Amino acid sequence: MKTASKKVINGWAMYDWANSVYNLVITTTFFPIYFLAVTGEHVSFLGMNFVNSALYNYSMAAAYLLVAFASPILSSIADTRGNKKNFLRFFTILGSLSCSALYFFDGDHLLLGVICFILSTIGYCGGLVFYNSYLPEIAAPEDRDRISARGYSLGYVGSVILQLLGFGLVVMGPKLGLGKSQPVQLTFLLVGIWWFGFAQITFARLPKSIATNPQHGGSAFTEGFRELRKVYAQVKQLPVLKRFLRGFFFYSMGVQTVMMAATIFGGKVLKLPDEMLIVTVVIIQIVAIAGAWSMARLSARFGNLRVLIAVVIFWIGICIAGYKMQTAMHFYLLATAVGLVMGGIQSLSRSTYAKLMPETEDTTSFFSYYDVTEKLSIVIGMFSFAYIDDITEDMRNSVLALVVFFVIGLIWIISALRKQKQLA
């Protein structure tokens, strides 16, 4: 196949620009800081008591769990009916409106905040399976690493811009006559508008997907389950892909949890000021741009699986260092290290899967396996992190536990590389 036109490629990558601001500005930075600020150390929610940081992590895990159950059916329907763009548009609207509604969240409306946070997270991660599934449709195999890295890089650039805008509102808020919490609440609103607005470029430029089953003999859900069984049967016959997915499942538990919990760790354990946490996340995202492009170049020279093995080993070192760190300087240095491999491992994982999957029209269904693998890993990672934090009331123990996930993931990726060599 040939790579699509530059207009289509840029349109696809613009969705990373549009929706990454939610994950990197809201989930990673402003919302966890704000959530801890407006809630007490221990909170009551739906008749149960939680450590506030644990409730935050449980809420995120719940959102990812819901998507993990729904996306295989939705993606199969999207393939058989040829309407993946409509699903992408639905999750964009759900996520961006819920994110904007966080503007009304304060300490007196905990239920509103948690519900909007869960819905906006569902909108963010629910749309990714449909977005990712376009990659093998618009990019030739030899171009997928580069184009995947382009999407992640644009996402980080856009996030830095909005991150700086939000930081400016926080710093200049008193001079602008804003209340103490209004700058952050306005940032929630701006992220929702940004996400919805720039996504329109993607919707205008991406081609309409073609139905793989133009004749419908049953309901959409019946066809969805039938499509899943067909894809599962193919995956079982692909030993390298099967091993890669198992490794991806385990190392994603660590990667995603570190990314989502880093800000809470810096604020709660090291008592870093909010302004420094925001600046640190901006630095992480700038470094991540270089990291994503570097991984694409390294994979072209050494191969995807070899580079992934090296990066996972690096992540193990990050977790051990995170357990031992004591000072703000340790946090800033470690955050820079996280940025170096954060964008790279996400971009390379996506393109590696696109390379290993067979030539097929069922791209959304195949990417649903990738998406569900990632979502379930996030659920287990975040739940484990929250549970250990809730029981021991020491987040350092949660960080150390992530090493186990990375080690298991490393073993499976090494196994995938060995099998690849045997089949070569």
Image: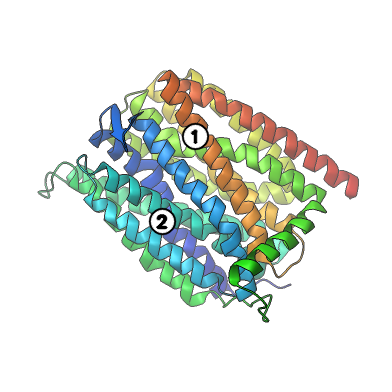
The residue labelled by disc 1 is 383
Q: Disc count in the image?
A: 2
Amino acid type shown at disc 2: Gly
Q: In the displayed structure, does residue 248 sit left or right of residue 240?
A: left
Q: In the displayed structure, does residue 254 sit left or right of residue 217?
A: left
127, above or below 337, in the image: below
Which residue shows up at 56% across the image and 70% down it? Answer: 84
- How far from the left and from the top, in percent, is residue 224? 63, 66
Foreground residue, 360 or 386? 386
Mark 2 Cα-neighbour bin, 10 Å: few <14, some 14–19, many ≥20: many
Ranked by sequence position, the earlier of labels 1 and 2 is: 2
Amino acid type shown at disc 1: Phe
Closer to viewer: mark 1 or mark 2 = 1
Q: In the displayed structure, does residue 237 sit left or right of residue 82?
A: right
Foreground residue, 86 or 293? 86
Which residue shows up at 32% across the image and 24% down it? Answer: 271
Foreground residue, 413 or 42? 42
